[in-house]
Image (cartoon, grey):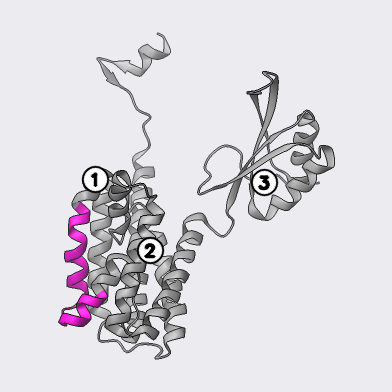
Amino acid sequence: MTVSQQLFTNGEQKKPQKSEAFKRAKLVQRIVMIVLGSAMMSVALEIFLVPNQLIDGGITGISIMISHIFHIPLGIILTLLNLPFLVIGYKQIGKTFALSTLFAVVLMSIGTQLLHPVAPLTGEPLLAAVFGGVILGVGVGLVVRYGGSLDGTEIIAILVSKKLPFSVGEVVMFFNLFILSGAGFVFGWNNAMFSLIAYYIAFKVIDVTLEGLDQSKSVWIISDKFRDIGEALTERLGRGVTYLEGEGGFSGDNKKVIFVVITRLEEAKLKAIVEDWDTEAFVAIGNIHDVKGGRFKKKSIH
């Protein structure tokens, strides 16, 4: 039986099967991390930001301002404003994303309601912005990393970017600048500026949570001394390399391309190794959000 015949039986495509234990473990991990992330965001909002009249960007920021103006519990506003984006997320991204997001939003709403009577840890706006931003960033990052969302701004940005000549990041930035400016009229401009600090910190911490402290980088190297460079990278960095076949677009010459994945802490050493062998080598380095499988684990260097 050929490979194509093995893949299709009775007109149905066979898919790799994962063990039930593996699926359950992954599901439990996702639930635990979403619960933890939602709880951390509730703490950031009710223990640090909201009592000090600071806001976050996105739907959360709008919810805080509406809650303050109309004296409606924050949890109710968060749930109501996020519901339309759950429907959009279901249609645009999928069922798993929508269910994970619904679970996270409900938990966050319940958490804010339970923590509302608790006294804030600090009355200093700067401390509240820093610690609230860090905790909020970790919470949001965990939820996003495990397949959910706590804010519908990104979904709006994706839809708007399809119709307007702006990237998703630019649309999100525009929305948040507008929202944070609104905080100036609701809470005063000093609080709006502290809110901007909290938002910036949360933004950066989300990146760290998603990418990890030990962020990976992919590296492509083109050089006539590819074999020497590849062996040096393996010996001095302890990283396995892959040789790819390439062809020069202008010259038409066959080229060997070295592909290797490193951590950001190893970037400077890699550049030094390449320059030792070929100062004219072409080196391209890019960020990677996640690395799985293969032999990425570093070998011991003797």
Q: Is residue 76 above or below residue 153?
A: below
Residue 80 part of the magenta-drawn span: yes
Q: Residue at x 29, y 15 (%)?
A: 9
Res. 95 mark:
1
Residue 145 appearing in the image: no
Of badges 3 and 2, nearer the viewer stands 2
Residue at x-position 79% and y-position 48%:
272
Q: Which of marks 2 and 1 is nearer the N terminus?
A: 1
| Residue under pointer 3 | 298
Mark 3 is on which residue type?
Lys
Classify 10 Å Cα crowding around label 2: few (below 14), some (14-19), many (20 and above).
many
Secondary structure, mark 3, is loop
The quadrant of the rendering that contains the N terminus is top left
Q: Is residue 295 above or below residue 90?
A: above
* Side (left or right) of 79 relative to 119: left
**Membership of 233 in magenta stretch:** no
Q: Where is residue 211 in the image (x, y as percent from the top left)?
A: 51, 55
Which residue is denoted by mark 2 in the rendering? 140
Q: What stretch is highlighted in magenta?
A: 64-86
Using the rendered view, name the quadrant where residue 214 is placed: bottom right
Asked which secondary structure carries label 1, the reply is: helix
Q: Which mark is residue 253?
A: none
Q: Which residue is drawn at 41% across and 77% down?
A: 132
Residue 199 in picture, x, y percent from top left:
41, 71
Q: Which of 205 and 113 is in front in this view?
A: 205
Quick one: which residue is furthest to the top in this view?
A: 1
